[in-house]
Amino acid sequence: MSDPAKLPILYELMLRIRRVEERIADLYSEQEMRCPVHLCIGQEATAAGACAALERTDHVYSTHRSHGHYLGKGGSVRAMMAEIYGKATGCSKGNGGSMHLVDLSVGYMGSTPIVGSSIPIGVGDAFGAVLRGEKRVTMVFFGEGATEEGVFHESVNFAVLRKLPVVFLCENNLYSVYSPMSVRQPAGREVYSVAQGHGIECHQGAGNDVAAVYDLARKAVRKAREGGGPTFLELKTYRWREHCGPNFDNDLGYRTVEEYEEWRKLCPLEAFEKRYLASGAVAADELRRIAERIEREVADAVAFAKSSPFPQEAQGVYAP
Amino acid sequence: MSDPAKLPILYELMLRIRRVEERIADLYSEQEMRCPVHLCIGQEATAAGACAALERTDHVYSTHRSHGHYLGKGGSVRAMMAEIYGKATGCSKGNGGSMHLVDLSVGYMGSTPIVGSSIPIGVGDAFGAVLRGEKRVTMVFFGEGATEEGVFHESVNFAVLRKLPVVFLCENNLYSVYSPMSVRQPAGREVYSVAQGHGIECHQGAGNDVAAVYDLARKAVRKAREGGGPTFLELKTYRWREHCGPNFDNDLGYRTVEEYEEWRKLCPLEAFEKRYLASGAVAADELRRIAERIEREVADAVAFAKSSPFPQEAQGVYAP
Amino acid sequence: MTRELRFFQALREATEIAMSRDPSVYIMGLGVPDPKGIFGSTLGLREKFGEARVLDMPTSENGMTGVAIGSALAGMRPILTHQRIDFALLSIEQIVNQAAKWHTMFGGLMKVPLVIRMIVGRGWGQGPQHSQSLQAWFAHVPGLKVVMPATPHDAKGLLLASIEDDNPVIFIEHRWLYGMSGPVPEGHYTVPLGIARVAREGRDLTIVSTSYMTLEALRAAERLAEEGIAAEVVDLRTLSPLDEGTVLESVRKTGRLLVTDTGWKTFGIGAEIIARAAEGCLASLRAAPVRVCLPDLPTPTSAALAARFYPRAIHIWKEARNLMGLAGAEGRPFEPPGVPLDVPDPSFVGPF
Amino acid sequence: MTRELRFFQALREATEIAMSRDPSVYIMGLGVPDPKGIFGSTLGLREKFGEARVLDMPTSENGMTGVAIGSALAGMRPILTHQRIDFALLSIEQIVNQAAKWHTMFGGLMKVPLVIRMIVGRGWGQGPQHSQSLQAWFAHVPGLKVVMPATPHDAKGLLLASIEDDNPVIFIEHRWLYGMSGPVPEGHYTVPLGIARVAREGRDLTIVSTSYMTLEALRAAERLAEEGIAAEVVDLRTLSPLDEGTVLESVRKTGRLLVTDTGWKTFGIGAEIIARAAEGCLASLRAAPVRVCLPDLPTPTSAALAARFYPRAIHIWKEARNLMGLAGAEGRPFEPPGVPLDVPDPSFVGPF
Ligand SMILES: Cc1ncc(C[n+]2csc(CCOP(=O)(O)OP(=O)(O)O)c2C)c(N)n1
Ligand SMILES: Cc1ncc(C[n+]2csc(CCOP(=O)(O)OP(=O)(O)O)c2C)c(N)n1
Ligand SMILES: [Mg+2]
Ligand SMILES: [Mg+2]
């Protein structure tokens, strides 16, 4: 870990994502959150590690599975929860729901659930920064499924061509809905290698090791900021719950319980605690205080969301 | 050259393409061919060499610049000429024009001018062959510009995933209309390398050396036929005339006269003659006989096209 | 013998029959062989027909549409699925430039027998990118056929007809119909493309409907009947080719036209139907025709907003009364009090 | 001071003025800085504004549309060009799912000021994949504005208004207008979006037209005038938002409606215009409205077929006479004998 002072914040980001999503899962059966939710429980380290490498003024774009990226970038827990509850106080004023989060105050520019489609938009955002002479970096999150979309390739080609300040962050969780890699991509061909063909610098990493993620992201972000162009990071990780919704779904049989248990052991939070408490890099006390704060935050956000009013009118169709 | 007996046919194919297109260029100003024409003069060796490696029952798909591929595959000169003249006797009965050629009797399945779009269709044709248990190979021609379209990547990924009997044949003539590689693809990154990222076998070759093209294509075709899966071939070549239309256009300044002259010296026909007449692999007599036959063919085709009737009714919109 | 089947079961049965009868039929799409089987409509097919004919695919909608087209040119009869019509927007180039035109532009030498199933989402926060209803687009493109069944009976018969058709067919299924039950004959039958269905006869006004809105229209017609107004409901079933005859015949009889569609109003399905009536039987029109369609707005996600966004029976009922010149009654809700408006029936509890 | 400019010069001047006034405007597209400069409409811009703001791009329509959107979110005002509207079909997903909805679906926090110029081809064997006219599609999608100028004056004023608009605008240019001349004021001015233009006044019938068909409509109106029939020609100019008011006002006056559009007839522009008239002023309609649009067929390539495919002044004239209840005169051709019908005027000699 290149920057041990960052450890508490990495933990905090991961735990916030975990607890917010667990709370969503707990409450979903009340049927008050009336929109699809794609939870990233189990994958928190990618979001936390990568976002922690960004400045507040840097930009992030994401996908259907975006709660982690939104919270990692520092998005408002209240506004997110209210959005999922469909309330006027939501980050998109009820027009978006879980799949369309935004928090401009922290550079979280938006998530959209069409696979692959926010990738070129993120690249364009970086292009815009260059055109305007702004020194920001844009990070684009997506799953390994998105690398099968042609637009991913078009985006990488342009980013390399123009040496844009983009970090492509691919969370490879082995599945697209219930479909394993084997029906979608050639056996034995790593995901990052299709990016590499475009001449972009690529790295593969352990997506559940938040410090490793942070280090990879930090280098990529620094390079981008210094005009060194884009980087593609493939981070291996695993979604614990169902593709969409609050439940576990190993009973469906599309993946083995062994595989699941294997990854369950690689829980990014447990791994963090085991490692850094043992080494003394963080104190149990500190982690407990963080956890307590997050519990309060989450409870507050749920109360805020539940008590907020519903929107009276949909957002108008044209910008004035 | 792995198969010297093929040399006369390679010459014949190249010369037919050259002479048909020169005739088109000569006659275009009469304004009787009322459709865009994208001539491949200078690039004949790729079409001739690659198609000569195919069986008649193999399939070919192509693009806006398809005269060479159509003729290389053995398509009817008369039907092509009549199509360009917009006649009822044309290969598409006047509905298609130069950009939509077809000759099912020789496995030429169609060309369409949306950049990149015939690539997945060719892959699907090969997929269909596999599903039906047919042992044919599909060859898909396209320019280097088409590798910038996302659908190219989607097509290669699927072909590799399913080990389909496809040969991707990329004619890299350095330009897309008037746009050089430098504004479209990263400097120093070879075109074939973006394909290679998908895990497909790739080769780069001299596109103006018809024997070299034939050898590369033959290996790829044989591998495909034997179930070895797809291959990507990048062949470097050069278009002599304007992107669309009958004229030379070096006066426009989008490419240098030096570059043009450099490639002009690499004329595939002259190179062939120089090399194989000198080595005695072909006889001057034989080449002359071929040339005479082609002159007659071309004259006949133009006469046929000019004297053919115009279609009375457009093709109906639905298959019955 | 006629049994009751749900809409998704009818789709599955049609696919199974088509695949049994013709070895060139195959089905491909994201999740086709997965445990959920396209909301149940492809379940069991993999077991019966094997991996070669029941396929998952990469998330490459455009490329895979081209692949389907190419395989059709090679003699197969592919069925391609999209769990949301919104995803199919990636493949518009292949559908519109290639599939729709291949037969014509090559002088009739080839054909593209291809069915593309697209599901329209509604409710439960599907939001702006998971609930568009773009039938007007496809119906505008010569060379495509466009089908939108409203009942399990038609789902089966129209899907079989679509698979057996030698042209590309856009087969649009509304997610809220999936759980609906209805009588479905066993065995093979087809409902021919291009023929509308008079779902209910009436003399006072004509309600032309598509897909799920047929159900809402029938509910409205029920109440109108109680009030002494006899609405005729014409379920279009096929948008292209369009059955102008059945529509005009009804309008000539009733003199009043209301069109209700699952898509946006402006430049949508309703416009064409009203234009046909104005062109074909202007003199019969006794009142200005009216459209009950989606407002021209991206779908809002919040249930509170969606409830106001989507037209339902009550809106059709109100407009029908207006058409009849009856003053604006408020009308009691059609739904039992407290029933949420963003789910079709209790069997649908989300999230998908 | 008003000079005559050609249509492409008007477009270029508008772009130059917009780029001079606002450093966030940039223009990008295949061939934008090349020696032909999008049929002349971008010539000289590279020299004036430099490489950073006048860009070529990879042949990646979908990705580059996303790039344009992202740059707009970052504060730029991109103009993206397509030499044929047919190529833009690759980017439908970005246009429809993203650009059109971004403002609304994020609660109004962001905006996408983006102009996408698309050129519609016609004649000289452009054929099925280089001559579609898909304005009805874009006009159906909430969140997009759709503009189709018919004169050099409007080309400049509408393009400036489009660039200055904070929403995604689909700006559709007909290739056959490029050589047309007309008066164009110097300097900056805008023609507001959403306002139709009465191109010719008349009391007997209303011809609603779009883009190039406005020219054919005016030619038809000329001859009709010689015959004592006063046709009013309403050039829509903007399809979305649609200027219903101007259309209805005219129809109320004339009682007769003919719509002529460059796109396919069915589910096209004409349907919406006729529907608006039927909804808004049914009682005024004295005869069944009529559409003069493309037949529902992919464009055939042969000049012989294209001559019969494309509607021209004579078709409008004939239908207008029908509308007036005048028996079917054959009518002498509008074009001088021997003039080819697949080119707009002698300045256009192909191939592109
Ligand atoms: C273009 C498109 N196709 C299909 C879908 C349906 N879909 C939603 S999420 C998803 C899985 C994508 O997998 P991946 O990119 O690996 O992300 P993950 O869900 O694993 O995080 C799919 C196919 C979609 N939203 N968009
Ligand atoms: C999707 C699409 N975009 C743009 C065009 C316009 N266009 C026609 S040919 C061409 C050049 C393509 O270059 P390349 O693939 O290298 O083929 P070449 O012309 O060099 O043989 C372009 C951009 C098109 N036909 N289709
Ligand atoms: Mg995944
Ligand atoms: Mg090229």
Image (cartoon, coloured by chain):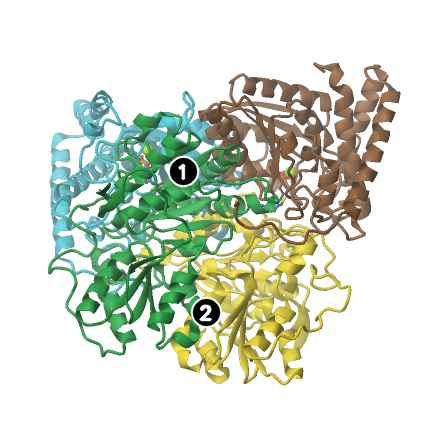
Chain colours: A brown, B cyan, C yellow, D green
User: Is residue C102 in view?
Assistant: yes
Height in image: B4 above or below C101? Answer: above
Would you identify the image quadrant in which residue A104 lies? top right
Q: Could you tell me if residue D268 is visible in this image?
A: no
Relative image position of residue B284 (x, y in whole percent): 13, 30
Quarter of the figure with the C terminus of chain D: top left
**Amino acid carrying mark 2 in the image:** Gly
Q: Quadrant of residue D257?
A: bottom left
**Residue annotated with mark 2:** D280
Nearest the eye: A274 or A122: A122
The kind of residue tagged 1 is Ile
A82 over C166 or under it: above or below: above
- Tag 1, which chain? D
Q: CA distance from mark 2 to mark 1?
A: 36 Å
- C290 sits to left or right of B220: right
Which residue in the structure is indicated by mark 1? D79
* Label pair 2/1, CB-CB below 8 angstroms: no
State whether label 1 is within 8 Å of ligand 2.
Answer: no
Mark number for residue A170? none
Give coordinates of residue B179: x percent, y percent: 32, 30
Residue sitting at x 70%, y 61%: C341
Instruction: Characterize the local packing of mark 2: few (<14), some (14-19) or many (20 or more) Cα atoms within 10 angstroms.
Output: some
x and y percent of residue D138 in the render? 44, 52
- Image x and y of residue D49, in percent: 35, 27
Q: Is residue C198 above or below residue B284?
A: below
